[in-house]
Image: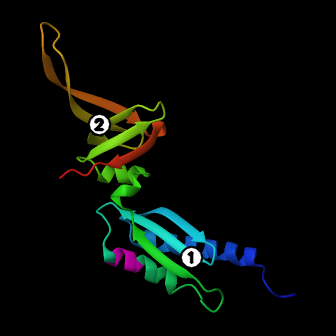
Amino acid sequence: MRGQKSPLFILKMLKQKVTDLLQEVLEEESSLFLISKEIKPGNKIIIVIDGDNGVTLSDCMKVSRHIEHNLDREEEDFSLEVYSAGISEGITHIRQYKKNVGRKLEVIMDDQNKVTGTLVEADDEKIKLQWKAREPKPVGKGKVTVQKEQEIPYETIVKAKVMVTF
């Protein structure tokens, strides 16, 4: 057993190497950013990326090739999958909010309130949503359409997703 590396040590080294390689390629391609990185049993590496201007197949291939060409399969066998973040995944990073300004979002906050509106602003601390609502007239019968607006700090957002409309 002397001289052999434990499976836990090898996994730890693989994780660090993948992290370093991701950092290199994302620094090179500054419009891209990491959403998630996971290494599953059997050394199945799954990477999800997004980009300020979206993600192309070429972007996924560039990230995949950079990692694959710099890992040694002789040292440890692995499989690698690189995906772009899909709309169904929800929004998890500030950069994703900023790139989706102008789109309709559904946001669930930590008080369980849900707001659906157009994302009109996103900075480093909060987002601003706007929507129209029907409310009773201040005087008389009937309802009137009013423009609503709400600022939501990131730390209060539990879940947010882009609403696809056709």
- Which residue is labeled 2 in the image? 129
Q: For the residues marked 2 and 1, what is the alpha-carbon distance in whole angstroms? A: 39 Å
Q: Is residue 121 left or right of residue 71?
A: left
State the residue lying farthest toward the right. Answer: 2
Instruction: Indicate the secondary structure of the residue bearing disc 1.
Output: strand
For the point 38% across and 71% down, the residue is 29
- The residue positioned farthest toward the front in the image shown: 141
The residue under label 2 is which amino acid type?
Leu
Vertical arrangement, residue 94 with respect to residue 144, above or below: below
Residue appearing at x 40%, y 56% in the figure: 89
Nearer the observer, 134 or 25 = 134
The image quadrant of residue 149 is top left
* Residue 110 numbered tag: none
Q: Secondary structure at mark 2?
A: strand
Q: Main secondary structure of the magenta part?
A: helix
Q: Which amino acid, mark 1?
A: Lys
Indicate yes or no whether the magenta region holds residue 60: yes
Q: Earlier in the sequence, mark 2 or mark 1?
A: 1
* Residue 124 highlighted magenta (yes or no): no
Residue located 78% across and 79% down the image? 6
85 relative to 114, above or below: below
Q: Nearer the viewer, residue 50 or 166?
A: 166
The magenta span reads: 58-62
Q: Quick one: quadrant of the N terminus?
A: bottom right
Please name the residue shown 50% across and 79% down the image: 80
Q: Which residue is mark 1?
A: 44
